[in-house]
Amino acid sequence: MLKLFTKALLNSQSNLITRNLSVNSKNLICRDFIISKCFVVNIRQNSSRTLKYLTERTMVGESEPKKSKTEVVIGTHDGVFHCDEILACFMLQQLPEYENAKILRTRDLTKLNECDIVVDVGSVFDVEKKRFDHHQREFKETMSSLKPEMGSEFDIRLSSAGLIYCYYGETVIKTLVNKFTGTEPDMKCLKTVYKKLYESFIREIDAIDNGVPMFDGEPRWTISTNLSSRVSHFNQTWNSKENFDAQAQFEKAKELVGGEFVDKIRYYTEVWWAARALVQTALKNRFNIHKSGEILELTEFCPWKQHLAELEKELELEGIAKYVLYKNSENDWRAICVPKTPDSFVCRKFLHKDWRGIRDSELEKISGIKDINFCHATGFIGGAKTREAALEMAVKSLEGNYQD
């Protein structure tokens, strides 16, 4: 009887109608046969009647089969959401094991204990148990404490975003790069981008979530358009009278944060990293530009500041470069000063103080350099019509006896 029934199921078309499978028939099958593997068959009629046989199960006697747990669940807190758990959830969902995971937002510990992984709630940090909260009093971890090889400068206490990035970030980067390009980044690229992405993206989220200011003292102005601020606008306002779909807003915020995170990864792996070789060549050839070795020339403009700082450190040449030359466009060259740090506005040596804020013929007369056309008012960059004029601008500034 079972063989005939199974054969009928397999040979049926989508319009097959199965009716009146009585309880007695089911009991007879259960008593007489042990079915270790069955196919799931959905047979739909206009009345939406569905007959299902569960896959990969064993039926013994008349007992109801236990439902196996196939749904993966990421747990986080409900209520007001923040950028850190939004990003933590997004990063996890880029990984194969969590790509179809449901996000459960609750503070019910019983429900959280059933989740596969929990972020930003629960008062537990335990990597083996996949519990990543940072709110408990005893939590003091930073990126530098968990990954000493990153250096000592990353001393901001981690949020849930930083925790997930710390343990899953490299895999997330590899997964996304493979999705974009079909290949994985080499180890040097991966390690460098991992550090850069924390430094320029994740760390800010950690600091804001933990209430760590950028510097001591009162700022003259504040940034109100950062990613954490924009995420906060997806929460319900205090005076809203409309129905609020918190889960839908959470997903919208996750789309925003995830989009910026992916854009950063693409930039650092596809644009920024590709510039490293050009900067390395410029540093290697520095004595061909000027005998001091303190003026570099890029064969084409690219993001160079961070690479230069890292390469100088690797080669024990920290602080050696003072100016960088590059061609901006036809008949347009630039001499730009090297900042003390990649993000600083303070340069190792500014262009000559007598030229600042002056242009064209007046600047030619004061500087004695033909084809020079401008010097920025702060002295951090200048322009010329020819390479020779840009180089002379850098040389005269280098040799100038003046203090800033």
Image (cartoon, rainbow, N blue to C red):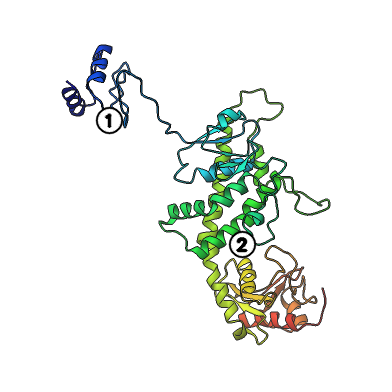
* Nearest to the observer: residue 278 or residue 53: 53
State whether residue 317 is above or below residue 265. below
Q: Is 289 on the left-hand or right-hand side of 217?
A: left
Q: Is residue 94 visible?
A: yes
Residue 91 lies, in percent from the top left, at 53, 46
Residue at the image position 24 percent from the left and 26 percent from the top: 14
Amino acid type at image mark 1: Ser
Give the mark, 2 or 1, whose residue is nearer the N terminus. 1
* Nearest to the observer: residue 7 or residue 181: 7
Residue 165 lies, in percent from the top left, at 58, 50
* Nearest to the observer: residue 163 or residue 301: 163
* Residue 155 quadrant: bottom right
**How far apart are the two marked residues, 2 and 1, measured between alpha carbons?**
51 Å
State whether residue 104 is above or below residue 184. above
Q: Secondary structure at mark 1?
A: loop
Which residue in the protein does label 2 denote? 149
Residue at the image position 55 percent from the left and 77 percent from the top: 281
Q: Nearer the viewer, mark 2 or mark 1?
A: 1
Residue 328 lies, in percent from the top left, at 59, 71
State whether residue 347 is above or below residue 3. below
Amino acid type at image mark 2: Glu
Q: Is 8 on the left-hand or right-hand side of 343?
A: left
Quadrant location of the C terminus?
bottom right
State whether residue 291 is above or below residue 269. below
Q: Is 376 on the left-hand or right-hand side of 313?
A: right
Which residue in the protein does label 1 denote? 36
Is disc 1 surrounded by few (<14), some (14 to 19) or many (20+) residues within 10 Å?
few
Q: Secondary structure at mark 2?
A: helix
